[in-house]
Image: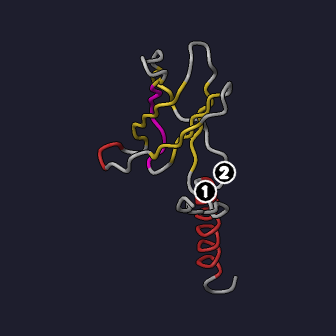
Amino acid sequence: MVPGTSVLRSVFIALALGCSLLGCTSRTLPLPPPEVSSVTAPDADGFVTVSGYALEGSSVGVVNDRTGDGVVVPVADEDACDNTCAWEARIRAQVGDRLRVWQFFETEGSLDVSVPKPK
């Protein structure tokens, strides 16, 4: 056996294991939906409040399938919330409307645009 072979083999195994663990936590993989704890009945203005828990630092999107209206809210980066943090979104909806809820992290494929001044 060549001297140092077992050390090289150990380093290679450690690197392979580390890379595989990092790959499992990649934020580019599809995320599970956030937890939805409650949805209120519509208020006098026609809005419902949807709340729950999602991954720290993510954003949560809520879309009303009937109207196509949607809202995106950030999930707080709080030290006290461990890995999942509370979120809350208000969206216009009627009784019986289906709301689609998902969580995501910012991606490099996004485009920032500015709203122009009125003419």
Q: Answer above or below: position of 46 versus 63.
A: above
Residue plotted at (58% across, 47% down): 104
Q: Is 25 colored magenta in this rendering?
A: no
Q: How many marks?
A: 2
Q: Nearer the viewer, residue 61 or 14?
A: 61
Q: Residues within 10 Å of mark 2 (few under 14, many from 20)?
A: few
Establish if 49 lies above or below 28: above
Q: Is residue 52 left or right of residue 8?
A: left
For the stretch drawn in magenta, the main secondary structure is: strand
As drawn, 116 above or below 63: below
Residue at 65% of width from left, 74% of height from top? 9
Quarter of the image with the N terminus is bottom right
Q: Horizontal and vertical percent for residue 81?
A: 34, 42
Task: List x then y, in percent, for residue 29.
Answer: 66, 51
Q: On the rendered image, what quadrant is the C terminus found in?
A: bottom right
Query: Which amino acid type is shown beneath numbered disc 1?
Result: Ser
Magenta segment, which residues? 49-56
Q: Secondary structure at mark 2?
A: loop
Q: Which of 82/72 is in front? A: 72
Q: Residue tagged by mark 2?
A: 29
Q: What residue did someone put label 1 on?
A: 26
Cα–Cα span, label 2 and label 1:
6 Å
Mark 2: amino acid:
Leu
Residue 89 x %, y %: 46, 34
Which is more toward the observer, 104 or 5? 104
Q: Where on the picture, by quarter, is residue 113?
A: bottom right
> Front-most of 100 and 17?
100
Please tell me in which quadrant of the rendered image residue 34 appears: top right
